[in-house]
Image (cartoon, rainbow, N blue to C red):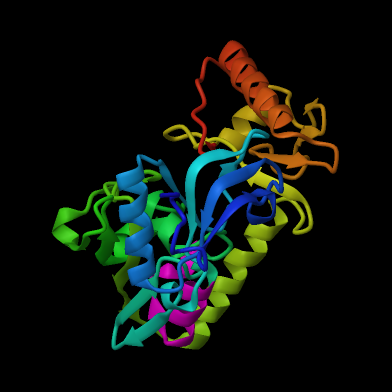
Amino acid sequence: MAFDTGIEKCVRRQVPLAPYTWFRLGGPAEYFAEPATQDELQTIVRRAKSEGLGVRMLGGGSNVLVGEAGVKGVVIHLSAPVFSEIAVDGKSLVAGAGAKLGHAVDKAVAAGLAGLESLVGIPGTVGGALRGNAGSRSGDIGQWTAQAVVMNNDGEIIARRREELVFSYRESSLDELVILSAKFELEQDDPADLTKRMQQQWIVKKAKTPLGHQATGVIFRNPRGMSAGDLIENAGLKGARVGGAEVSDRHANFIVADEKATSQDIIRLIEHIRGRVQERLGVELETELKIW
């Protein structure tokens, strides 16, 4: 029996992944799944395990680079409304993993709940933000997370309480296959003051990042106590180019891909940057970008 037998309504074959990523590059997924319900998601996960197929979760695509050969196995995209619901109850906000992080931030601020506003301008979904503990200098998403509901590769659904969760710099202990939703315990504040603070942070961040129409992505984690962008700039790499990939002239920790770029161009430029920073500054950079 083929993997997609009986679930063709939510699973397609050989779907190009480029339109789902910020770099707009890369080949197709062998199977691309967009379940409409939690039951369909469980069926896909359990079927993949029984067929011995690898499974990858694709969120907003802001930190993923897909190779030209594409991806074997199953890529799951939680695009259905049931995975993107956001609700406020008192000082708590519950958000589905498929919700855009920006929407969760806006909802919290409108409700007069402080905590998440420092995440304004960070792309991607709530699920991706939780897995990588997204944050800024003002704080990260982990410090406000009270519970996360996850699904393991057996299709079992588990609620993980705060005391079971560990968050560190751009990492979390949420290593199950799927993050379904999270509950955030926030602090009451004046919505007008929150909006003003959020807008100020947004303006600062936008001034330092590539333009919205560019195919781009953040590449490296910041080493402890240092800025990856500053290190790359100090190594003389701002504007460095390999093929159609170039280090952004607005922020050196971004690579911008032009219309002729390939995934391999970006990979080669990443290695060039890493080698030059190591050679000139003695710092080994670690990629934040996930390469499939």
User: Extreme left residue here?
Assistant: 163
- Residue 257: which quarter of the image? top right
Residue 138 in view here: no
For this orientation, the residue located farthest to the top is: 279
Q: In this orientation, which residue lies closer to the viewer: 151 or 9?
A: 9
The answer to whether 151 appears left or right of 262 in the picture is: left
- Depicted 10 relative to depicted 261: above or below: below
Looking at the image, which is closer to me, 42 or 249? Answer: 42
Residue at (23%, 49%) from the top-left corner? 166
Left or right for 17, reference 159: right
Q: Position of residue 213 (x, y in %)?
A: 79, 57
Name above or below for residue 276 compared with residue 86.
Answer: above
For the point 58% across and 62% down, the residue is 121
Is residue 45 part of the magenta span, yes or no?
A: no
Does 111 lie within the magenta span?
Answer: yes
Residues rendered magenta in the picture:
103-119
User: Residue 126: x percent and y percent?
Assistant: 44, 64
Q: Position of residue 290 (x, y in %)?
A: 52, 39
Q: Quadrant of the C terminus?
A: top right
Point 85% across, 43% down: residue: 259
**Left or right side of 282 for 184:** left
Residue at 37% from the left image edge and 49% from the top image edge: 48
Q: Is residue 106 toward the left or the right of residue 171 in the image?
A: right
Residue 103: x, y in percent?
52, 75
Q: Residue furthest front?
A: 1
- Asked which quadrant contains residue 180, the reply is bottom left
Which residue occupies the foreground of this view, 211 or 15? 15
How many labels, in total?
0
